[in-house]
Image (tube, rainbow, N blue to C red):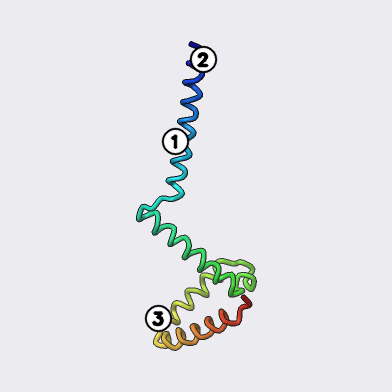
Amino acid sequence: MAEALLATGKSAKRTTALRHRLLLQSARHDQRRWQVRRRERTRKLIELGGLVAKSGIVDLVDDDRAIIYGALLQAAAVLRSEDGDDAKRLWSRRGHRAFNDEPE
């Protein structure tokens, strides 16, 4: 009887461990719409943060977020102005040139 009780306890532990593994696996591959959108947004934010760092502005302002945010607000204001289209073309050319000049 004691052996049967021990076997049942071990079986319950294995079942619980398997259940936890399955829950973790399903969480990793969660394809719910909100989860997929959240992952896409996170990826986009990481890429944009990488561009901010790649531009060198972080080092120029000693990682002062207020300055970086102010610069981005100024860029947005320029884009909203009547010179916005010219700024887009200029900045786009500059950005493409910088991407092309990077070593691979």
* Residue 3, percent from left and from top: 51, 15
Q: Is residue 40 above or below residue 53?
A: above
Q: Tell which of 17 and 90 is nearer to you.
A: 17
Kind of residue at disc 3 = Arg
Considering the image in quadrants, where does the C terminus appear?
Answer: bottom right
Ranked by sequence position, the earlier of labels 2 and 1 is 2
Q: Where does the image place residue 23, in percent across and percent down from the top left?
A: 44, 41
Q: Residue at x 48, y 25 (%)?
A: 11
- Reading the image, the residue beneath label 2 is 3
Q: Position of residue 76 (x, y in %)?
A: 45, 77
Q: Residue at x 48, y 16 (%)?
A: 5
| Distance Cα–Cα, label 1 vs label 3 | 54 Å
Nearer-the-camera pick, 97 or 89: 97
Q: Which residue occupies the foreground of this view, 76 or 28?
A: 28
- Closest to the camera, between mark 2 and mark 3, is 2
In the image, residue 16 above or below residue 21: above
Residue behind mark 3: 80
Specify which label sits upstream in the sequence, 2 or 3: 2
Q: Nearer the viewer, residue 42 or 17?
A: 17
| Residue situated furthest top in the rendering | 1
Pointer 1: what residue?
Answer: 19
Local packing at callout 3 (Cα closer than 10 Å; few below 14, some 14-19, many 20+) is: few
Relative image position of residue 79 (x, y in whole percent): 43, 81
